[in-house]
Image (cartoon, rainbow, N blue to C red):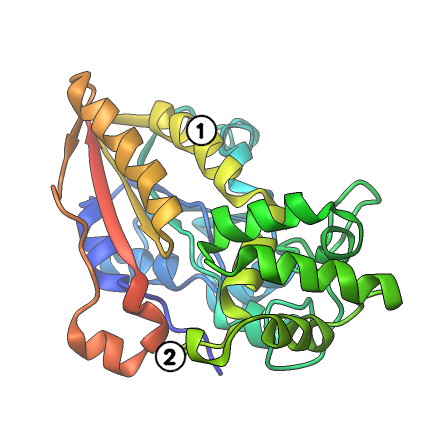
Amino acid sequence: MAHTTVLLHESVDGLNLKPGSVFVDATLNAGGHSQLVLEKLNGDVRVIGIDVDADAITRAKQNIKSLNASFFQENFRNLDKVLDQAGVEQVDGILFDLGLSSDQIEGSGRGFSFKTSEPLLMTMKKDLLSTDITAYEIVNTWAEQTLADIIYAYGEDRFARRIAKAIVTAREIRAIETTEQLAEIIASAVPKFGFKKINPATKTFQAIRIAVNDELGAIKEALPKAFAKLKPGGRMALISFHSLEDRIVKRFFKEKAVAGEGKLINKKPITPSPQEVAENPRSRSAKLRIIEKI
């Protein structure tokens, strides 16, 4: 399944970029947003694409042939270092799309999906260092209380304690090595009536993925760095898919607005149209917020 970029036109239009702009695509993926920016401005824009996933960089390079685009394999929390490396002091627009791509879910082989049996990695990075945490380490070594805490906090799952207990009980018999094993353990731990619309493993997989990649920490670190790199009149747009992500963004944007440093372009988040949700159900939880630097 090819990845469909969510809120594509709303986010690019909201950045209000002009010819000659410098645009940072902080979550490049296959380059959908960057492609549209280049198209709308007839190539008269400098695009700086960032993604921690080497596969995403490869996909983007295949899709974007413009000489005005440069690509950096890096976590967006280090956006300031990337811009220093690119020789750019300030930019006109920055976009964060915090969603996991269909390519990562279905084609990476890194254990993001519970629908297939894959190794328990859940890492955005393809090439791991010995210091990088994986889902295997979390599932097989973290304390039961810690597991329950992250499943409840990051997955917002009311059955977090039951799931954590089931994981610890199962790993005492043998190590949990695949997504299929983990999904079966979760399903056995929760009442069947508790999950009518979604797979019972959904929230736990989400929670573990967030913990593996320190996703909330990365957002908290990236937002002030990104805002500092914006020119006056420059805009930052952010698409979130999780209430915890949106809460961080909403609070940061509000602080900047109250301090007189930023202007909220949309007081309430922009959400996908019914048509977009019908065509791409994964878009249903997306929220777009945009701020302009004063």
Q: Which mark is residue 24?
A: none
Find residue 156 and report its horizontal and vertical position in percent.
44, 54
Decide which of 46, 286 is in the foreground and name it. Answer: 286
Q: Is residue 73 visible from the viewing direction of this image?
A: no
* Quadrant occupied by the C terminus: top left
Whichever of labels 1 and 2 marks the residue nearer the N terminus, that label is: 1
Which residue appears at 39% of the width and 32% of the height?
A: 223
Which residue appears at 38% of the width and 79% of the height?
A: 197
Find residue 71 and report its horizontal and vertical position in percent.
54, 49
Find residue 207 and report its horizontal and vertical position in percent.
54, 54
Judge the density around disc 2: few (<14), some (14-19), many (≥20) Cα neighbours within 10 Å: few
Find residue 116 and report its horizontal and vertical position in percent.
65, 81
Which residue appears at 59% of the width and 76% of the height?
A: 187
Q: Is residue 92 visible from the viewing direction of this image?
A: yes
Decide which of 175, 92 is in the foreground and name it. Answer: 175
Relative side of 100 to 294, left or right: right
Q: Which mark is residue 197?
A: 2
Q: Which mark is residue 88?
A: 1
Between the residue at mark 1 and the residue at mark 2, the CA separation in whole angstroms equals: 46 Å
* Element on which disc 2 rests: loop
Which residue appears at 48% of the width and 46% of the height?
A: 153
Relative side of 266 to 246, left or right: left
